[in-house]
Image (cartoon, rainbow, N blue to C red):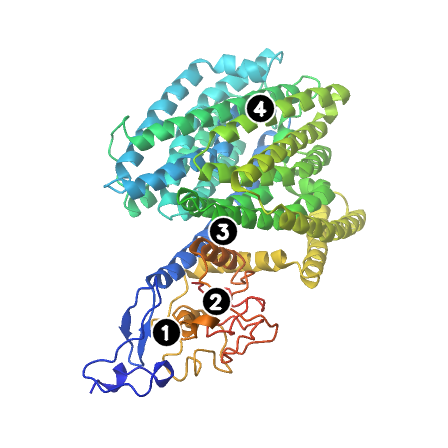
């Protein structure tokens, strides 16, 4: 006789009159496509599948990675604000500030493109493929990629330092010679940043493919802290306050330019310990015949076209803002940095974590799953970005005064930044959605289409900027130029939408449009309320940085709460899912992945239901849902008469449905619960123990037929779907 601990529970015995036999009891036959494993737990023998044991770890890893990235992005942007405030307080928003901004923005534009995912997105799919196909796990290809980046960008740095006067002449055509000379000196100091930005982007791509997301997101914090310390040191150097073009000293130039470049170097070097920790060992090599490197050549070629076209647009805009009659370069750039904050916190973190999964689905030919990934990213981005845009539009001035009215920047200068910020807010939604849609092309290793679309975007921006600048007064260019920027990205979004509908067979446009409309209405109510409250508070407390800061806080709290409450009460599921996602990811970033139970639910009288369902007082905890049920639903249906059996669901359709359930936080819109059991045609509430097929609204627990209908409330977010 086998020991009592090895005997299966009575609830799992399909035929009680089985003849006696020696040895451990026979396991019930596993359904087709399942791999049966036995685990002696002391309470029974559990039957599981390999896929179910792997899925929770992957889900927990993705949630933890996204949480760490969100925290890192918030820390980076917060210190970035302090950096911008410190620079403005040190050198103001005048001629010296414009020269500094123009020289430093040349490598910064490349950095924004890399951080936004252009080069990383193009390289990640190639690295993923090499890690799967190469015998060394892709280390050789990654080393070749690093070597190629160092050689190529190193040559570009040397060439840029030699041609610095010509480069500045492109951005400052017709400006004062003294201002151009200062900008040229600063650019020679800043050009090495391009090399370290590029190497850092490649190292970040290597870390992303190895599921390490924290270091690339936290490294910019070091850069910002170094620049803040540089600005403090700049105050200690003797010289004019604020500095002038003719009065700035060599020591001031050395501290300002050298400290800015030192921050970029430290940011890149900080990635090296993490790169070694994930197992990558760089070996100087350049295998030009590697298939992945040849593919990277093609991707890099189109990426280079993307960068060059963007630089052309940047040159035109910079010339318009650097005109001797306007001098609004710093105002325009400071507003642009604030404008990018919502997308940087929400969009970059979510999309960066989603791209490897989307690339895997694209490589496997699972178009439906790619479409689901894109729909999820789009709807979550809309839910976060639309209210952000409306609140920036309503509170642009007090936000800018709160941040920039310090040191050499007076209230009038900060108000000009706020007006430019409000104009940029109109471009936030098309800009963010355009960046999200580009990731679908990169998932298919298609960098050609984004480059060609970007040509149209830049051309539209240039034409609109020239026309609007001609119509508006020079001092108003910081307001009209963002309107041309918005028009350009609206045209780009239309183009990518049409192309993706053809490529993917649709982009779930109806659902996205419904969510966008509902979010716009509810967020508009909150933004109007916030604007009214902020105006009243500023009239009472004053229009300086302190009164504006208090007005912004009160307005955001009241208006934001109004938006959230109206959204939740009106049944906007994306809002609830976004709140759960943000809370879950931030929590996952702090506490790490949830611990999984080794025993299957129902393996004891305490943990499981009597006959494949849930106990009356059980809640859908992650530890219960991580294991397989005592009687799998597929085994239950295998015992039905043949004439009552329902057709088996196709594999791709099942994966698509399960993907929707995972993206919705466990809520399965496809008629099955997270556990995968099929509900009946009725709309009653299945208790989990009811095997009649009436469970149209299940509790979310995996059980027998009728136990989970998929229309019930969202389960515990820690639940691990199949």
Choose mark 3 or mark 4, whichever is in front.
4
Nearer the observer: mark 1 or 3; the answer is 1
The residue wearing badge 4 is: 314
Viewer-nearest of labels 2 and 3? 2
Q: Is residue 85 visible?
A: no
The mark closer to the camera, 2 or 4, is 2
Of the image marks 1 and 3, the number of the one nearer the N terminus: 3
Task: Name the N-terminal-most of marks 3 and 4.
Answer: 3
Is residue 279 found left or right of 57 in the rendered image? left
Badge 2: how crowded within 10 Å, few (<14), some, or many (20+)?
Answer: few
Q: Mark 3 sits on what residue?
A: 71
Quadrant containing the C terminus in the rendered view = bottom left
Q: Give how far apart the Cα atoms at labels 3 and 4 are.
A: 31 Å
**Front disc: 1 or 4:** 1
Q: Residues within 10 Å of mark 1 (few under 14, many from 20)?
A: many
Q: Earlier in the sequence, mark 2 or mark 4?
A: 4
Specify few, some or many for label 4: CA neighbours under 10 Å numbering under 14, 14-19, or 20 or more: some
Residue occupying the point 44% across, 28% down = 258
Q: CA distance from mark 2 to mark 4?
A: 60 Å
**C-alpha span from label 2 to label 1:** 27 Å
| Residue 207 vertical placement versus 27 (above, below) | above
Q: Position of residue 429 (x, y in %)?
A: 64, 41
Decide: marks 1, 3 in contact (CB < 8 A)?
no
Residue 296 vs 508, above or below: the answer is above
- Of callouts 2 and 3, the N-terminal one: 3
Image point 25% across, 30% down: which residue? 284
Q: CA distance from mark 1 to mark 3?
A: 34 Å
Please give the residue where the numbered disc 2 appears in the rendered image: 646
């Amino acid at each position: 006789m086998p020991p009592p601990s090895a005997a299966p529970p009575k609830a799992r015995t399909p035929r009680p009159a089985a003849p006696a036999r020696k040895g451990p009891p026979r396991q019930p036959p596993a359904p087709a496509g399942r791999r049966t494993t036995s685990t002696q737990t002391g309470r029974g023998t559990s039957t599981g599948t390999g896929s179910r044991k792997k899925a929770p770890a992957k889900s927990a890893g993705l949630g933890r990675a996204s949480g760490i990235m969100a925290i890192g992005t918030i820390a980076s942007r917060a210190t970035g604000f302090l950096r911008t405030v410190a620079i403005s307080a040190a050198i103001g928003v005048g001629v010296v500030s414009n020269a500094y901004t123009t020289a430093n923005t040349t490598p910064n534009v490349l950095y924004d493109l890399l951080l936004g995912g252009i080069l990383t997105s193009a390289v990640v799919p190639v690295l993923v493929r090499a890690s799967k196909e190469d015998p060394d796990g892709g280390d050789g290809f990654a080393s070749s990629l690093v070597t190629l980046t160092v050689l190529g960008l190193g040559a570009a740095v040397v060439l840029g330092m030699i041609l610095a006067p010509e480069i500045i002449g492109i951005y400052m055509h017709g400006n004062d010679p003294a201002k151009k000379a200062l900008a040229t000196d600063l650019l020679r100091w800043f050009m090495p940043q391009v090399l370290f930005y590029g190497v850092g982007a490649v190292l970040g791509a290597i870390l992303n493919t190895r599921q390490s997301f924290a270091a690339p997101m936290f490294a910019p914090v070091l850069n910002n802290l170094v620049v803040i310390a540089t600005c403090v040191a700049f105050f200690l150097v003797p010289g004019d306050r604020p500095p002038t073009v003719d009065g700035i000293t060599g020591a001031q130039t050395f501290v300002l330019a050298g400290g800015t470049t030192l921050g970029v170097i430290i940011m890149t070097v900080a990635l090296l310990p993490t790169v070694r920790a994930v197992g990558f060992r760089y070996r100087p090599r350049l295998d030009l015949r590697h298939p992945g490197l040849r593919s990277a050549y093609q991707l890099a070629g189109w990426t280079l076209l993307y960068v060059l076209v963007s630089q052309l647009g940047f040159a035109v805009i910079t010339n318009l803002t650097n005109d001797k009659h306007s001098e609004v370069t710093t105002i325009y750039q400071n507003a642009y940095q604030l404008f990018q904050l919502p997308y940087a916190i929400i969009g970059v973190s979510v999309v960066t974590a989603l791209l490897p999964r989307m690339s895997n689905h694209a490589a496997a030919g699972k178009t439906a799953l790619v479409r689901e990934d894109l729909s999820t990213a789009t709807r979550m981005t809309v839910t976060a970005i639309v209210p952000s845009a409306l609140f920036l539009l309503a509170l642009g001035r007090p936000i800018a005064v709160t941040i920039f009215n310090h040191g050499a920047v007076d209230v009038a200068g900060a108000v000009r930044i706020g007006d430019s910020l409000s104009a940029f807010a109109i471009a936030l939604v098309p800009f963010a959605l355009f960046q999200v849609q580009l990731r679908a092309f990169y998932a298919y290793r298609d960098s050609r289409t984004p480059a060609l679309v970007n040509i149209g975007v830049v051309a539209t921006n240039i034409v609109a900027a020239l026309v609007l600048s001609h119509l508006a007064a020079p001092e108003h260019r910081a307001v009209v130029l963002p309107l041309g920027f918005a028009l350009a990205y609206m045209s780009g979004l239309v183009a990518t939408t049409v192309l993706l509908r053809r490529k993917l067979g649709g982009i779930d446009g109806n659902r996205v449009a419904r969510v966008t409309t509902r979010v716009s209405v509810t967020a508009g109510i909150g933004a109007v309320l916030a604007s009214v409250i902020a105006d009243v508070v500023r009239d009472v407390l004053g229009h300086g940085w302190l009164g504006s800061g208090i007005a912004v806080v009160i307005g955001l709290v009241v208006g934001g709460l109004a938006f959230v409450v109206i959204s939740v009460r009106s049944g906007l599921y994306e809002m609830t899912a976004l709140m759960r996602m943000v809370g879950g990811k931030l929590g996952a970033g702090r506490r790490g992945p949830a611990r999984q139970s080794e025993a299957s639910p129902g393996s004891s009288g305490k943990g499981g239901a009597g006959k494949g369902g849930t106990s009356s007082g059980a809640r859908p905890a992650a530890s219960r849902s991580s294991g397989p049920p005592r009687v799998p639903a597929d085994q239950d249906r295998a015992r039905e008469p043949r004439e009552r059996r329902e057709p088996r669901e196709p594999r791709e359709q099942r994966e698509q449905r399960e993907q929707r359930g995972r993206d919705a936080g466990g809520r399965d819109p496809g008629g099955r619960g997270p556990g995968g059991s099929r509900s009946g045609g009725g709309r009653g509430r299945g208790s989990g123990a009811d095997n009649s097929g009436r469970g149209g609204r299940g509790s979310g627990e995996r059980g027998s037929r009728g136990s989970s209908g998929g229309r019930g409330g969202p389960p515990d977010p820690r639940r691990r779907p199949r």
